[in-house]
Image (cartoon, grey):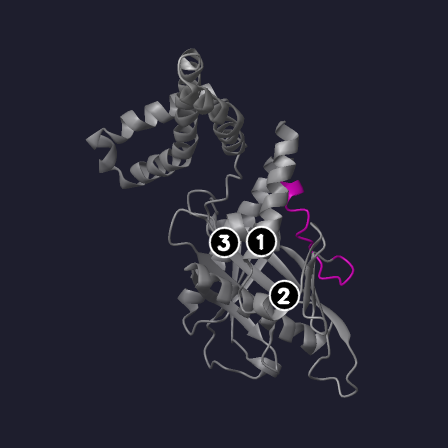
Amino acid sequence: MNLDELLKEYSELESQLADPAVHADQGRARTLGKRYAQLTPVVGTYRELEAARDDLSAAKELAGEDEGFAEEAAELEKKRIPRLEERLKHLLIPRDPNDDKDIIMEIKAGEGGEESALFAGDLLRMYLRYAERIGWKAEIIDSQPSDLGGYKDVAVAIKAKGDDGVWSRLKFEGGVHRVQRVPVTESQGRIHTSAAGVFVYPEAEDVEVQIDPNELRIDVYRSSGPGGQSVNTTDSAVRITHLPTGTVVSCQNEKSQLQNKESAMRILRARLLAIAQEQADAAAQAERKSQVRTVDRSERVRTYNYPENRISDHRVGFKAYNLDQVLDGELNAVTQALIDAEMAEKLAQHS
């Protein structure tokens, strides 16, 4: 969509939002309001740029009579206008349609046994701390703990409180995360390498993914804790299989079968939305190429090296020696490097 079309859409949204009848339908009003908020920085910057260009014309006309106008013209031409043009160029780059969405994140232990499960637990705590620092709400919706306090598999829903979506900052976390350290189970003090897989999905709303109940197989069973020990005397755990795609989701965190079913359906909807988007748009699949489907130590997006206190993101060449702080939730520098790299790539494509 070009600038003229965006300006027209903005004007139409303004008229619609001024109509009291629109606000009778809260869902529609919310959708229109969200789009209006997205376009406001674009229109504001465009208007500011047009005003600066008008000021430049006026200043040039008066420059011969007053030296102050000549200085103003030079400042507008060399600094202010190019700065506004660059800002508008950035704002006009097509957004990821999922950027304002909440997410469901799954962390799965890979090769490395108990050490990998402990690392999966470390990653979970890192994301929970990061969410806490930003003011997001995080909720563990399913987990399979390991014997030593890690996780074989854990799913967490993360919700934003404002307009800045979780997906926009955490979509790049998908992929294999590798750890290098001396495991607690290692008596010789040798450094081992193990890995955990992180899968990130934009959370789907009911209207986005239509699921036919006849295409689901729902099994119930008794939930179990670490080491296979029974933690529930009733069949409250739920396994849902989506027959057309073969997608399987299990949940056993809650004591209620109904709550486990609701959690499993949230994860299923998110996975099916991701599948649908990948099938509908090859670009979406390319953007998620780092979200590998196997937790193989060789296919990694990031390495956490404990002896050197180093974190390295292999996709953008990011490297820092504050691993302890990153694991405590200070992820901003890492996520920003990935966001900047995506922006640079999009700018190159649209230049």
Residue 78, given in percent of the width and then of the height, sits at 53, 26
Residue 126, given in percent of the width and then of the height, sits at 55, 67
Looking at the rendered structure, which numbered label has been put on residue 2?
none
Badge 2 crowding class, 10 Å Cα cut-off, few under 14, some 14 to 19, many 20 or more, is many
Which circle's residue, 1 or 3, is located before the other in the chain? 3
The Cα–Cα distance between marks 1 and 2, rounded to whole angstroms, is: 21 Å
The Cα–Cα distance between marks 1 and 3, rounded to whole angstroms, is: 15 Å
Q: Quadrant of residue 153?
A: bottom right
Q: Check the image and name the residue furthest to the left.
A: 20
* Total labels drawn: 3
Residue 23 can be seen, yes or no: yes
- Which residue is under mark 2? 108
- Which residue is under mark 3? 103
Left or right of 217? Residue 302 is right
Mark 3: which secondary structure? strand
Mark 1: which secondary structure? helix
Residue 276, given in percent of the width and then of the height, sits at 57, 42
Magenta residue check for 287: yes
**Nearest the eye: 129 or 29:** 129
